[in-house]
Amino acid sequence: MWVYEMESRLHQFNAILLWLGGVLCLVGAILTACGRIPTPTVAQPTQNVHGTETAIANRIFATMTASAKDTAQAQPSSTTIALPSPVPSLTSTVRPSQPTRPPFTVQPTAIPSLSPPTKIAYPVFPDGSLSANGQSAYQCPQEGVYEVVIRAKQMGVQSKLGFAAGLTFGAFDVGGGLLKFPSGGNVLVQTNSGVGGQDIDAGSDCANPGPDVYNGKIDLQYLVASGYKKMAIRFVRSTSDLSPMSQDVAIDFSKPGRWWLYFRAQ
């Protein structure tokens, strides 16, 4: 029984080998047109069944081996694969070190000492020593009068009056603009020598008991009526050159009266 089962399995194995051999022969025929496969010779049946099957299997194996060799010879012996050239290594550029700057220190700025402004030495300046009350500018109240009178003395003149003649003075508004008369002319007047009736009745100068002599006068009644009650009196270089020759003297006609101004010219 055991021998029979072994023979049955051997027959099945031989059948599988025959089927595989046919498949491999078909593959070999496609690849090599089966030119090298010999025509199998039909062997006469013999009594030794197992030997015949073994011989057939050996022949099929030999045929398969030959086909495999022919296929291997038809393929190239070696395949050369082109490898990519090596990627050059990236090298970082090293920058040279920058020189270290010294720290910036802010030096404190010395605050300059403020000196008092220099007083401009004008050639014509107020001088209270020429008046009886020691003031260089004052108003004597008088109803209906809006006048400015000038007493300008000349330094070094040994005359009876000693007035400085030919000096130009004018009236300016609070903004520094030269005022004009209703006729359109500039409010500019020149001093005289004080001789020839240039005097006012005694008592018009409330600070002096005697005759009040002057050498310049401006009647500002029309300007005050126009609204100019506050103004400044200033000496200038000439009627065509308004460069200041003296400091401004403030005048206020909020009340009527006559302003007396005392100057000394160098």
Image: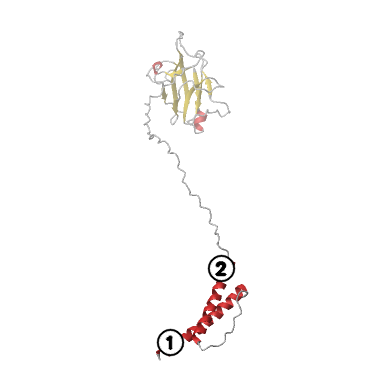
Is residue 214 placed above or below 86 in the rendered structure?
Answer: above
Which residue lies under the disc numbered 2? 72
Is residue 265 placed above or below 138 in the rendered structure?
Answer: above
Return the residue nearer the eye: 118 or 216: 118
* Amino acid type, residue under disc 1 in the picture: Met
Q: Quadrant of the N terminus?
A: bottom left
In the rendering, which numbered label is found on residue 6? 1
Q: Secondary structure at mark 2?
A: helix
Q: Secondary structure at mark 1?
A: helix
Return the residue nearer the eye: 172 or 206: 172
Mark 1 closeness class: few <14, some 14–19, many ≥20 residues within 10 Å: few
* Amino acid type, residue under disc 2 in the picture: Ala
Task: Residue 75: give x, y in percent of width and height.
Answer: 58, 66
Task: Residue 219: give x, y in percent of width and height.
Answer: 51, 25
Return the residue nearer the eye: 228 or 239: 239
Q: Residue pushed farthest front? A: 47
Return the residue nearer the eye: 36 or 256: 36
